[in-house]
Image: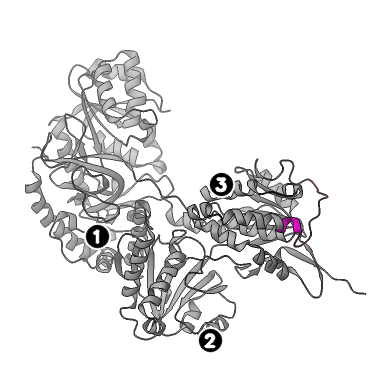
Amino acid sequence: MRFRFGEPGDVTEPSHERLAVGDERVVDFLARFARRLLSPAVARQHPELGSLGYFLRPAELARAVARMRHDDALVFPRGNVFHVPPANVDTIFVYSWALSALAGNHNVVRISERSAAAADVVLEALHATEADPVIGRTQRMVTYGRDDAVTAALSAWCDLRVIWGGDTAVDTIRAHPLRPSARDLTFPDRTSWAVLSVPGWRVADRAARRAAVLGFANDAYWFDQAACSSPRTVFLVGPRPDGVADEFLTLLGEAVAEKGWSVDAAMAVEKRVHAYGLAATGAATGLRHAGNAVTGLTLSGVSAAPRRWIGAGAFPFAAVESLTDLVPAMTRQDQTVSHFGFTPDELRAFAVALGGRGVDRIVPFGSALTFSAIWDGYDLPREFTRLTTVKT
Amino acid sequence: MSVFTRTQKEREPVLLAELSALVAHHRAHCPPYDRILAAEGFTTASAVAELPWLPVRLFKHLVLKSIPDDAVFKVLTSSGTTGEVSRIHLDKQAAATQTRQLGATLRTVLGDKRLPMLLVDSRGILTDRRSFSARGAGVLGMATFGRDHVWALDPEGRPDLEAVRGFLARHGDAPFLIFGFTYLVWLHLYEVARDAGLDLSNGILIHSGGWKKLVDRAVPPAEFRRRLAADVGLSRVHNFYGMVEQIGTIFLEGPSGGSLYCPDFADVVIRDPHTWAEQPTGEPGLIEVVSTLPTSYPGNVLLTEDLGVVHGVDDGDWPGKRFSVLGRLPRAEARGCSDTYRSGRAA
């Protein structure tokens, strides 16, 4: 086992260190760490770390701590938390770890051997941040290979196990039993969508349309459209959608070119394989290539919307009359719906009609990837704490 | 009669006409193919490079054939490293054509007579039908072009020096055929023959299978040829490039080495992987392989995941384009929250 952060040693050994919910030593550490992430050099090289730094600035930390408070109970750390983040989104592990640390938990984060460059930058920043010694003794980040014994020991040690990385990861890790009192917090495979109001688009001026498309491009291209909250299919909502998809794709091509994003050759081939697959079965009836980075697909209907990843910059389009027409197609697997051109009432009515059966987040274009303390339907600060009631 | 006869100028119009007719044929008989072309808005092509291409990997995801089920004579499968395999459907006529054209292509360098043949492989690869792979199919397919076959490897895949010595004692004084995958030839024939002081100067080597395993040992193609000639006298060496998805079509290295050539019924187009436009001579890109042989499935124009470059046109051993394969397209770095990504891109 390789220690990437924190004091080396037997991580499952009982500890007498105690942290409180919103412990000042943790708050200080996270605030200093956030400042490093927000430094221009880091933010320029890894913009996603800038977002992380923003999430961890003092005002946000105070808000997260406030969310942990409870009127009717005393709030304590949950205890030992074992985090298994995905290998290929570099920053997720920091969000869930930071919230858990803020709640005063002892944390062990398993960082994948396949972790990418941004993870190294995060670890460097953690090391460079001045810390009370208690931080290193209670917060550990480790890398180990396919070692079931270690996963089993950590599973037996923890009070809460946080598993990111999709259905397969959840099933694999779940093979290791937890203590009877412990529980899992799981982040399985998710699908996310975009909804675009046709009337809203028509009344928007060119600048507003461009801004919307730019936000959408950020949501889609930052993680090659493979983040769980990245939009996969665009639903055009409203009467007479003719021409909207074409204009959207043209603007998207411009936005992507402006940002200098490109789809590499292997991805571009991948995209054709999947797009042709959809065409071959009749799920897609039209294909349009706006440069290499943007491919539009016309779907034969809402039910043809693919739930699997089909490639960086492949956007199926389907038209519906109203948001409520989408309700039957949404499932528990669906996470984020990013929107443009709707009124707050329309969006609220959509959420109410969904009734919690699907879709956890409804956010404007450009915010799909913005992490929040409420994620995948969980109030994370609450999940990382436990409550004690006292009646006198 | 050679199949390397047509200049690019002669070849293009013939191929365009035949391939356009095949596109129409496949559209009429393979509905999924027709739906793909309809979605792309394809109507007609005025050049070979304008013909609609399919990613070769599509044959791992979809059943694409232009013949009814009861006409399927043979289903070929590619070697699948991740469990995914291409399935190529042939009817009797297509199977016969591919064998005939493969033979015609090889006769260019082997001559009209069947030669004694040394197979640089192990009989073992044919015995397990479940693992019967492109390698097995390749060896079996090639075996029909030789006679008095001897395996150069024992059933465990180790060099069988006595078998090779025996073969050379019987046939080493006149032309003979050697076939094997490039890295097997290097590791299990060349090195063994060199150390044992064998004379392979009457051999004609046909080899394929890529250079990846040799690149790890720092053996570039030119070095491969040079050392075979210098150390074991093997100077007639022909690499070829081909794939199960376009069975029967091989792009064969010319006598002077260094370039692959297209038989008259085939061609290659090198594409810029960003604009998808045809690359000019000298510019590398993705290799599209074009052949008139696939009549039972829509595999006439396939975009491979190999990188290549055209070195010249009508300026080499044989007419037409001459090109090299530069290696596999590097896989993209995986990103994403979940493993759906990986399952979507398994290849």
Residue that label 3 marks: A120
Q: Amino acid at mark 3?
A: Asp
Return the x and y of residue A357 as percentages of the image width and height: 58, 76
Please say if A145 is above or below A46.
Answer: above
Q: Amino acid at mark 2?
A: Asp
Residue name at image x 65 percent, y 49 percent: A129
Left or right of B155? Residue A23 is right
Disc 2 versus disc 1: distance between alpha carbons? Answer: 53 Å
Asked if marks 2 and 1 fall on the same chain, the answer is no
Please say if B257 is above or below A382.
Answer: above
Direction left: furthest residue: B10
Direction front: furthest residue: A40
Residue in the foreground of this view, choosing between B303 and B314: B314
| Disc nearest the viewer among 3 and 1 | 3
Label annotation for residue B66: 1
Image quarter where the C terminus of chain A lies is bottom right
Asked if marks 2 and 3 fall on the same chain, the answer is yes
Q: Quadrant of residue B125?
A: top left
Residue name at image x 56 percent, y 59 percent: A166
User: Dot 1, crowdedness within 10 Å: few (<14), some or many (≥20)?
Assistant: many
| Disc nearest the viewer among 2 and 1 | 2
Label annotation for residue A345: 2
Q: Element type at marker 3?
A: helix
Q: Amino acid at mark 1?
A: Ser
- Stretch of the chain drawn in magenta: A8-27
